[in-house]
Image (cartoon, helix red, strand yellow):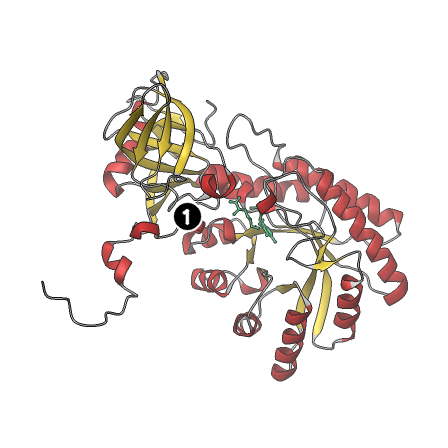
C-alpha cells in the first residue's frame, strides 16, 4: 500500500506520521484518535497557491472548513495564507475564535439565518455567497438598517452532472443550491443585486460536487458561466471581477481512486477561464477555488483499538474497533471505501481478510469490508487512512460515544488540538427532571 505524506514504518515496525510513533500516540491519548500530518496539509495548500502564482493569476484559495473545522485548523489555514469558506454561524464563530482575518472569510449556505447574516456583516467578512432570493432580500434589509454595503458572489447552478456519488452532487439543475443559470433565476438575481445599493456583486460562484476526478465538469461550468457573463455584459453592463469555481477536487482513498494532481485541476481551470475571457473580450477575472477534502483528506488518519471478533463460518470474519460511524459516517452514508493497516505491526504481511465493524448499535456500522490484514487480535491498533476530511466534522455522539481527540503531528512533535469528549460532556447539556432517581 502507498503511504501518504510523511507516513512510514519506523524501526520498531510501527506506523510513524510526522516523525511520531502512532502506537505511542494511541497509548498517550487513547483511541479512537484522529491524527493529522501537518506538513502534508501545508504542502497541499502551497501546491494550489503556487500553481496560481506561476500562471500569474490573481486568486484566492479558500479552505472549505466544513471538511474539518477546528480552531487549530483554521489557524493553520491562516498561516498558509488561505482564505476561508464557512457555511454556518458555528463555522464563522470558529474562524473568529481562531483570529482568522475576517476580510478573507466567505460565507456560504443555502439557508443562512437572519442572525447568521447579521453576524457576518457585523464582522465585516470578505463576502457572502448568496444562494437564493430569500437570502438576497434579508441581506438588503440588514444592510439598509445598518447603512452598509456587503460584497457578494451569486451562487449559480450551471446544470452539470459531475461524476460522483448522488449525495455529493451539487451543480445539477435539480439541486437545492444556487440560482439556476438557465431558467431565468440567475438573471433576475443579478438584476436585483445590481439595482440594490446595499449589494456589491463581485462575481459568480459555482460548485459542482465533491470527490471529482476529472476537469470536464469544471470546464463545462466555466463555459456556461462565461456565456451568461457575456449576455450580462451586453444587457446589464456587468463585468465579473471574481469567478469562484468551488471545490470538489478528488483524492485517493484506495487504489480504485485515480485523482489528477491538484496543480492539474488548477492549470486546466486557468487555461479555460483565460480562453473564455479572451473569446468574449472580457477582463480576466480573479479565480477563487474552495478545496476542502483535497487539503486535509489524506493528511488525516484514525487510530482505533481492536476489540472483539466474530466468525461467521465460511462467510466472514468481523473484527470490531472502538469507534465507527460516530467518528466516520462516510462508509454508511456514501459507501465510502478506506484502506487500513495495523499500526503496531506495520511491516507484517496480510494473512487473512476481515471486515472492520464499528461499535455502534447498527448493522450498517461497518468501516471497511474485506480488508486484508495480518492476523489481528485484542489491543492491536488499526490505522485507517485518509480520514482527514468529513471525519471529525461529521462526527456525532450516537450511542453517546464521546467524540475522539484530535492531534496534530509535525516535525516529531504531537500537539493536542481537540480534547477527547468525556462522559460528563455527554450529559452536560441535559437538564434533569428531578434530583437523581433514588434506587
Ligand atoms: C460550496 C462548497 N465549496 C467547497 C466545498 C468543498 O468540497 P471538497 O471538500 O470536495 O473540496 C463544498 C463541499 O462539497 C461546497 O459545498
Ligand atoms: N461530506 C461529504 C462531502 C460533502 C461536501 C459538502 N458539500 C463527504 O464526506 O464526502
Q: Quadrant of residue 237?
A: bottom right
Looking at the rendering, in which quadrant would you find the C terminus? bottom left
Instruction: Name the residue nearer the viewer: 180 or 39.
Output: 180
Q: Residues within 10 Å of mark 1 (few under 14, many from 20)?
A: many
Q: Report the side of 380 relative to 274 (left or right).
A: left
Q: Report the side of 240 relative to 245 (left or right).
A: right
Image x and y of residue 305, in percent:
28, 35
Image x and y of residue 32, in percent:
31, 41
The residue at which mark 1 appears reads as 392
Q: Is residue 74 visible?
A: yes
At 72% from the left and 52% from the top, the residue drawn is 173
Q: Report the side of 316 relative to 43 (left or right).
A: left
At 78% from the left and 67% from the top, the residue drawn is 188
Instruction: Classify 142 as above or below 52.
Output: below
Image x and y of residue 82, in percent:
56, 51
Instruction: Classify 266 as above or below 377.
Output: below
At 36% from the left and 43% from the top, the residue drawn is 362
Amino acid at each position: 500500500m502507498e503511504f501518504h505524506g510523511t507516513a512510514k514504518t519506523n524501526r520498531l515496525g510501527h506506523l510513524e506520521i510526522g516523525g511520531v510513533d502512532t502506537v505511542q500516540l494511541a497509548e498517550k491519548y487513547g483511541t479512537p484518535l484522529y491524527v493529522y500530518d501537518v506538513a502534508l496539509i501545508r504542502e497541499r495548500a502551497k501546491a494550489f497557491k503556487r500553481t496560481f502564482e506561476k500562471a500569474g493569476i490573481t486568486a484566492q484559495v479558500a479552505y472549505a472548513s466544513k471538511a474539518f473545522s477546528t480552531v487549530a485548523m483554521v489557524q493553520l489555514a491562516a498561516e498558509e495564507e488561505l482564505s476561508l469558506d464557512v457555511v454556518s454561524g458555528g463555522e464563522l464563530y470558529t474562524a473568529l475564535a481562531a483570529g482568522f482575518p475576517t476580510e478573507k472569510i466567505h460565507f456560504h449556505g443555502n439557508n443562512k439565518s437572519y442572525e447568521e447574516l447579521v453576524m457576518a456583516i457585523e464582522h465585516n467578512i470578505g463576502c457572502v455567497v448568496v444562494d437564493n432570493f430569500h437570502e438576497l432580500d434579508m441581506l438588503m434589509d440588514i444592510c439598509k438598517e445598518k447603512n452598509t454595503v456587503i460584497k457578494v458572489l451569486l451562487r449559480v447552478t450551471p446544470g452539470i452532472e459531475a461524476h460522483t456519488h448522488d449525495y455529493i452532487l451539487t451543480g445539477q439543475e435539480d439541486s437545492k443550491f444556487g440560482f439556476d443559470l438557465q431558467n431565468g433565476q440567475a438573471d433576475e438575481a443579478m438584476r436585483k443585486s445590481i439595482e440594490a445599493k446595499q449589494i456589491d456583486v463581485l462575481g459568480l460562484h459555482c460548485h459542482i460536487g465533491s470527490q471529482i476526478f476529472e476537469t470536464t465538469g469544471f470546464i463545462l461550468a466555466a463555459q456556461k458561466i462565461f456565456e451568461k457573463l457575456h449576455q450580462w455584459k451586453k444587457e446589464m453592463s456587468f463585468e465579473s471581477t471574481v469567478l469562484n469555481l468551488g471545490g470538489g477536487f478528488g483524492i485517493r482513498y484506495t487504489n480504485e481512486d485515480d485523482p489528477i494532481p491538484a496543480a492539474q485541476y488548477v492549470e486546466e481551470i486557468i487555461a479555460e477561464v483565460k480562453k473564455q475571457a479572451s473569446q468574449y473580450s472580457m477582463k480576466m477575472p480573479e479565480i477563487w477555488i474552495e478545496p476542502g477534502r483535497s487539503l486535509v483528506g489524506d493528511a488525516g488518519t484514525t487510530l482505533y483499538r481492536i476489540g472483539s471478533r466474530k466468525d461467521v463460518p465460511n462467510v466472514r470474519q468481523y473484527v470490531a474497533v472502538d469507534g465507527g460511524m460516530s467518528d466516520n459516517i462516510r462508509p454508511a452514508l456514501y459507501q465510502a471505501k478506506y484502506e487500513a493497516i495495523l499500526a503496531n505491526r506495520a511491516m507484517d504481511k496480510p494473512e487473512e481478510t476481515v471486515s472492520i465493524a464499528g461499535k455502534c448499535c447498527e448493522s450498517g456500522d461497518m468501516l471497511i469490508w474485506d480488508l486484508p490484514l495480518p492476523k489481528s487480535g485484542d489491543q492491536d491498533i488499526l490505522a485507517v487512512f485518509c480520514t482527514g476530511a468529513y471525519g471529525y466534522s461529521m462526527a456525532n455522539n450516537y450511542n453517546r460515544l464521546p467524540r475522539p481527540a484530535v492531534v496534530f503531528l509535525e516535525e516529531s512533535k504531537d500537539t493536542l488540538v481537540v480534547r477527547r469528549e468525556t462522559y460528563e460532556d455527554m450529559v452536560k447539556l441535559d437538564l434533569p427532571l428531578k434530583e437523581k432517581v433514588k434506587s
